[in-house]
Image (cartoon, grey):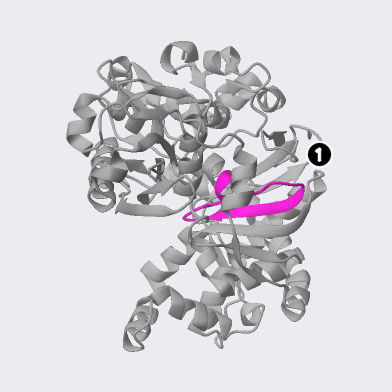
Amino acid sequence: MSLQYMIGMDIGTTNIKAIVMDENGTTVAQASRQNHLILPAPGYVEQNADEWWDNAAGIFRDLVIQAGSDIISNIRGICISSQTVTMLPVDAAGKPVRNALIWMDSRSSKEMHYISLEVGHDRFEVITGAQPDVAFLPNKMLWFRTQEPELYARTDCFLQSSSYVNFKLTGEKTTDMDQAVRTQCLDINTLKWSKEIGDACGIDFDRYLPAPVEPMTVIGQVTAEASEETGLPAGIPVCAGASDAFMALYATGLSRLGEAAESSGTSSLVFAGCDHATPVDRPVVAKPCGIPGIPYLFDAPISASGASLKWYLDELGAAEKAEAAANNKNVYDWMNELAASVPAGSNGVIFFPYLLGERAPLWNSHARGMFIGISIDTERADILRSVFEGTAFSIRHVVETIRAAGGQVDSFRIAGGGAKSRTWAKIKASMLHVPVYLLDDKAGDIPFGDALCAGAAAGIFKDTSETVKKLIGVKEVIEPDEEWAAVYDRIYPYYLSLYQDVDKDLLRLKNEWNRMK
């Protein structure tokens, strides 16, 4: 009997990646293409939805060539995840009305505060299970309605990144339940679009947001038109998909309380289980989880983990690039070696990784990246290590917040690009006082979770939890360095208090910059 195959695709902020996987968890083809950011003004971060589709269609064609016709003819399902939350308005024909405002876009902070006042901050938290934040959808939709009324008048509905590519594949406009919960437009108590928040925005959510469906629901099949563009056979079932966070949860293999994980990419998503529901007024809230053994799950996004390292490399890393080339090494491997050569504590330099504001657990858009402690003796490697450590301090801040709310963190699994750095992993293990598990290469990426979801939707995987345990392996365990841990324990209170001391000034400074525009 021939093997059955699935396609899993993730539409990330910087890249779209996809795999073809067989029922044994073996990747037989993979491809990726780069997305580009559009930055019209400070705080404005957009992407072109047509580039998403062009990249996705090209990736599908690459997969078809790599895998061959025999395998492609046995594809039983497709599942696509994406960055979230995105505001993409499309017209009745499904054509984008404007560029998408992605999660990094912070132009609608005034609208966010207006909605919070109209609904009431406490009531907003009760409805959405989270604090209002500029990354989410209501404020972006309100900004669009008031600032671009002619384009709003042409809008038929709003889609997420993955649901737009799903539309191009199937012709169906949909929203998956996972991303619906994350939009801050959904009432988590009723799982219906919130009329209260919609009224505050002046927008009928039921009119403009497709009814949510569960991630593994088959929403349609690859159409003949999509088949021509992608090379995929027409008729392959496509399921609703979910956020990158949801698929990362599968890709990390969490299966019991005490296990925590990070999906480490441009941004990071931190997961940890809990045996009870938590109050909605906490910075991080546990929500019901469908994994047996984990009744409730904390899901905390950190805005600029991998982005901080990329920023350093792009803006300050010319010497590292030259040195890596001279030593015939990958530049990120070279950066890891340099960072490892510096003692814990970065010789007094502390980096605050708030280059994009911060989501969990600060939930404010006015936070800014900072280096504190630079002196005449500071060397380039000290600054580099401080970036590794600052992003780990932000993870500790999230984990301590989760623990304070009743979550359990006894080990820490890392999937995604961050799992390739042993230096970073050792810093995180020492920062959190727990062993870090680096997942094997086949299991550590979000498209693997997408492929699992596609297999479950197709009926290939009857018990997803058991499948995850079987297919996901750990390639290395990184234990804490006790000397490093002692240093981090002494520095961490200063990491918290130094930011708290400047928070109000950063807000006033942001407002001053806005007045000067």
The structure residue drawn at horizontal position 50% and vertical position 83%, both measured from the top left corner, is: 338
Quick one: which residue is furthest to the front in this view?
1
**Percent x, y for residue 322?**
33, 83
Please tell me how crowded label 1 is: few (under 14), some (14-19), or many (20+) other residues with Cα within 10 Å.
some
Answer above or below: position of 472 versus 106: below
The stretch of residues the image draws in magenta is: 250-269
Quarter of the image that includes the N terminus: top left
Which residue is at the front of the view, 504 or 418? 418
The structure residue drawn at horizontal position 33% and vertical position 16%, both measured from the top left corner, is: 156
Which residue is at the front of the view, 403 or 61? 61
Is 88 placed left or right of 250 in the picture? left
**Percent x, y for residue 305?**
53, 58
The number of numbered badges drawn on the structure is 1
Q: Which residue is mark 1?
A: 275
Answer above or below: position of 486 versus 240: below
Is 360 placed left or right of 238 in the picture? right
The structure residue drawn at horizontal position 42% and vertical position 36%, both measured from the top left corner, is: 79
**Percent x, y for residue 270?**
63, 50
Amino acid at the residue labelled 1: Asp
